[in-house]
Image (cartoon, rainbow, N blue to C red):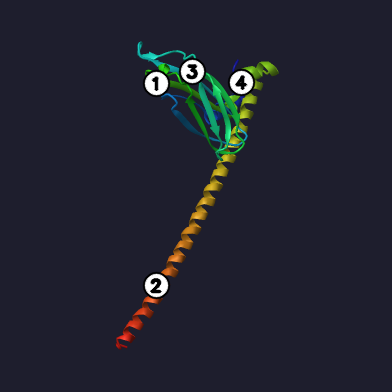
Amino acid sequence: GGGMPPFASLWAGCAALLACLSAARALYFHIGETEKKCFIEEIPDETMVIGKYRTQLWDKQTGSFLTSTPGLGMHVEIKDPDTKIVLSRQYGSEGRFTFTSHTPGEHQICLHSNSTKMALFAGGKLRVHLDIQVGEHTNNYPEIAAKDKLTELQLRVRQLLDQVDQIQKEQNYQRYREERFRMTSESTNQRVLWWSITQTIILLITGVWQMRHLKSFFEAKKLV
């Protein structure tokens, strides 16, 4: 028949499975004037992240959100797990930001409006649509295919290789987390052990002191 060759369908199946494991998140939230919203994103090292956002202002008259909010500014700030600022930049009512992680762990992504126009916030609500893409999701595959003149199968292979690379980074990050957790557990267990030993020593010293004190008391009362 005219079906897909077995190896091609295998590549396609693997690509579909790996796509399920990849990270791409889209959400929206509401903020007030100068209110800051932060999100925590766990990212492996050497991983590209692209964020896109657009804002909609609440219109009291129509009782709905406007399609665009001209004149509104948004500030984006990103901190790595060591709280070092990776990105701090001013954007408009719509924007796209990108960064590459160099330290594995929790990255803090914060957005807030810098608008001082009180009239803009008369309704007290601003809706922000945020789309965060991590790893191979940041690649524009149609553009890559056109640039490198790739066939459909070659493009699938390229996607699969990128996804395998991202999964390897995720696995390395999980191992890093497990190692940190193990070290924390060992440190905690060691502290508990030393605390137990210290308590035992204090109890022994207290017991000896009480016995000596009682002996002195009885000797003074000539009971022994």
Q: CA distance from mark 1 to mark 3?
A: 13 Å
For label 1, the crowd category at 10 Å Cα-Cα, with few meaning under 14, some 14 to 19 and many 20 or more, is some
Q: Nearer the viewer, mark 1 or mark 4?
A: 1
Identified by mark 3, the residue type is Leu
Cα separation between marks 2 and 3: 70 Å
Q: Nearer the viewer, mark 1 or mark 3?
A: 3
Q: Amino acid at mark 4?
A: Asn
User: Element at badge 4?
Assistant: loop
Q: CA distance from mark 2 to mark 4?
A: 72 Å
Direction from residue 142 to residue 208 in the image, left or right = left
- At horizontal 61% and vertical 20% (from top left) the residue drawn is 140
Q: Which residue: 62% across, 20% down?
A: 141
Q: CA distance from mark 1 to mark 4?
A: 33 Å
Q: Secondary structure at mark 2?
A: helix
Instruction: Kindly identify which residue carries mark 1.
Output: 125
Q: How many marks?
A: 4
In the image, residue 171 above or below residue 90: below
Residue 104 percent across, percent down from the top left: 58, 39
The residue at 59%/40% (across/down) is 172
Sequence-first disc among 2 and 3? 3
Residue 68 x/y as whole percent: 47, 13
**Mark 2 is on which residue type?**
Thr
In terms of depth relative to the viewer, which is nearer, 100 or 73? Answer: 73
Instruction: Specify the amino acid type for callout 1.
Output: Lys
- What residue is at 61 percent from the left and 28 percent from the top? 160
Residue 72, which numbered label? 3
Element class at badge 3: loop
| Residue indicated by mark 2 | 206
Residue 140: which numbered mark, if any?
A: 4
